[in-house]
Amino acid sequence: MAAESPDAPDLQRARDWLAHAASLAVLTGAGISAESGVPTFRGAGGLWKDHKPEDLATPEAFARDPRLVWEWYNSRRERLAPAQPNAAHRALVKLEIRIARFTLITQNVDGLHDRAGSGKTLKLHGDIWRLRCTVCGANWPDRRVPLPKLPPHCGCGGLARPGVVWFGEPLPEGMMKEAEHAVSDAEVLLAIGTSALVHPAAGLIPHAKHAGAKVIEINTEDTPYSGMVDCALRGPAGEVLPLLV
Ligand code: BV8
Ligand code: ZN
């Protein structure tokens, strides 16, 4: 059973590593947005009208029923619209100001790091607030909730899709290379609120370890990599991360 809160010596070790790190990489997952009221992918309540996210977040599901997939994204956007960044998102902005070589890598598509004021963010799985045309490839921001018409279309008349990466789709060109470079260069990797099940993103954790970084995991539960990290802090990111900054 995961502890409710991390013990003091672990917190102190993590605090010291962060205080002396000249370069820091951060990998975040849905868990960092949980305290902003955003349901995680695999946690309780992860279902939507008895559909599993993994079944809807695929090109096949979109080809089969673009309207159903768009109803899911539209309802997620509606739920996200009032969501505010939490203390964990804000603590990362403080670290970015303090540590010269800082790279934020996220699997989240919710845009809460942007709203917290984080600078350049590697959005490995895209952005729910952007649309992409399936015909002409145009890619644009659209924050309207709800969208006036489902499924939305591009100015060229083509069917628009959410600007996210679905299962079975490659990550944005060159982004994993950039993330791996940042992780190899980092003295510390902070892995926050990710179940570390989705690849290639999750592979950044062993990648950091093999490159010699200290790896700190902040999660309410164990993950497949909990055994290899240097410090596993058990507790909600919104409470634990501010204790380190
Ligand atoms: C690709 C965007 C190849 C869409 C998402 C078998 C083995 C290994 C890999 C595979 C396999 N079969 C298939 C694959 C590949 C597949 C994959 O990894 N599948 C998994 C499920 C096995 N990966 C892909 O398909 C990727 N593409 O491989 O392409 C390729 C290459 C070239 C050419 C063609 C193809 C693409 C993956 C991207 C999928 N898109 N999202 C959308 O969001 O709608 S993934 C989705 O899962 C989200 O992005 C989410 O962020 C991500 C990962 O989940 P987490 O963020 O970790 O969230 P989760 O709910 O799982 O966990 C939350 C965690 O937080 C938990 O640990 C919980 O304990 C913790 N927590 C909860 N509350 C808190 C907390 N922690 C702290 N504080 C709290 N308060
Ligand atoms: Zn178009």
Image (cartoon, rainbow, N blue to C red):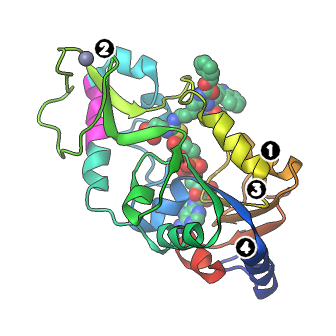
Q: Magenta span has 162? A: no
Crowd around label 2: few <14 · some 14–19 · many ≥20 (10 Å): some
Residue 56 in the image: state x and y as whole percent.
42, 30
**What is the span of residues highlighted in magenta in the rendered image?**
67-74
Real-space Cα separation, disc 2 to disc 3, in angstroms: 38 Å
Real-space Cα separation, disc 3 to disc 1, in angstroms: 11 Å
Residue that badge 2 annotates: 136
Residue located 40% across and 21% down the image: 61
Mark on residue 18? 4
Residue 129 in the image: state x and y as whole percent.
32, 43
Residue that badge 1 annotates: 207
Q: Magenta span has 70? A: yes
Residue 21 in the image: state x and y as whole percent.
76, 69
Residue that badge 3 annotates: 186
Real-space Cα separation, disc 1 to disc 4, in angstroms: 19 Å
Amino acid carrying label 3: it is Ala
Looking at marks 1 and 4 on the same chain, the residue that comes earlier in the sequence is marked by: 4
Q: Are marks 4 and 3 in contact (CB under 8 Å)?
A: no
The quarter of the displayed image where residue 64 is located: top left
Q: Quadrant of ligand 2?
A: top left
Residue located 21% across and 25% down the image: 151
Amino acid carrying label 2: it is Cys
Assign a secondary structure to mark 4: helix
Real-space Cα separation, disc 1 to disc 2, in angstroms: 36 Å
Quarter occupied by the N terminus: bottom right
Residue located 86% across and 48% down the image: 211
